[in-house]
Image (cartoon, helix red, strand yellow):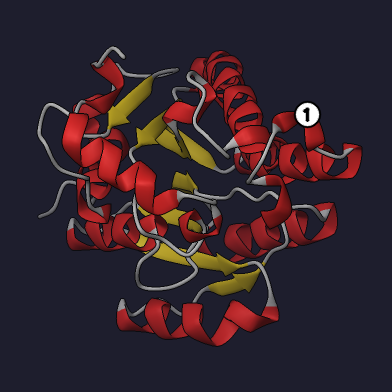
Amino acid sequence: MGLLEGKKALIFGVANERSIAWAIAKALHTEGAQCAFTYATERLKERVERLAHSQGSDIVLPCDVTKDEEVEATFSTIKERWQSLDILIHSVAFAKKEELKGKLLDTTREGFGLAMDVSVYSLIALTRQASPLMREDGSIMTLTYLGSQKVVPNYNVMGVAKAGLEAAVRYLAEDMGPQGVRVNAISAGPVKTLAAMGISGFGEILKRVEEKAPLRRNISQEDVAGVALFLASPLSTGVTGEIIYVDAGYNIMGP
């Protein structure tokens, strides 16, 4: 039996085979978890369905996290199909491409609101809907980045959003703690994903990490998935409200 035998996981954020969320889904499935998936737009539907079917999953639901009715419909279906939930993976973030370059000063009010809605409020909205379904010893996790704590060129409004996300993790850990549900975040180093490639100068960020990180390398999606598996499993029953770095040690280094 695997670590997650009999567990049910709902995963937000799979876009393609290179998504961190997909690497996490594979790790959870390998250890026995059943996985359900969502897709944000019709453009992603076929791709996510193909990946889900490769795991034997037939639960693939449309969910634009900025629309309350779609979030509610997703969890209504999960309740109908599964009755309960053990694991929630939130790997969702977005900012306008033009605001991931230049200066934070140039962020528009609209762009700021959009980044905060998709990247931060969505975790709150999903956790609220998941709460009645989550079983004791359940695990909720999200993905963040060092740009929440340090200035990373061109990360701009997304850095501000990730700081908000990390604060939300701590408050949600307190909210969900009494029912035995843990809430944590993984601060992943830069990984070549569809979302990351939209950041101006991303190649330079990868090069800098490889040169400076104690392990002298960049991380892989599988590195992140291993820690996600730990956080989803009984091995982490005493861990909540934490930001766990998976970045080859880059975050510990000085200038």
Q: Quadrant of the N terminus?
A: bottom left
Residue at 23 percent of width and 32 percent of height = 234
Q: Is residue 54 left or right of residue 211?
A: right
Residue at 55 percent of width and 58 percent of height = 198
- In front of the other: 52 or 91: 91
| Residue 236 visible to an observer of this rendering | yes
The image quadrant that residue 42 belongs to is bottom right
Q: Quadrant of the C terminus?
A: top left
Q: Is residue 34 left or right of residue 127?
A: left
Q: Residue 101, percent across and down?
A: 63, 45
* Count of number-bearing discs: 1
Query: Please, which residue is most extreme toward the right here?
Result: 109
Up-down relation of residue 109 to residue 94 (above or below): above
Q: Residue 220, percent across and down?
A: 23, 52
Residue at 31 percent of width and 39 percent of height = 232
- In front of the other: 10 or 197: 197
Q: Secondary structure at mark 1?
A: helix
Characterize the local packing of mark 1: few (<14), some (14-19) or many (20 or more) Cα atoms within 10 angstroms: few
Q: Residue 250, percent across and down?
A: 25, 27
The image quadrant that residue 159 belongs to is top right
Mark 1 — residue? Answer: 105
Residue at 54 percent of width and 87 percent of height = 46
The amino acid beneath tag 1 is Leu
Up-down relation of residue 164 to residue 208 (above or below): above
Up-down relation of residue 242 to residue 216 (above or below): above
- In front of the other: 69 or 80: 69
| Residue 96 visible to an observer of this rendering | no
Q: Is residue 80 left or right of residue 255?
A: right
- In front of the other: 106 or 181: 106
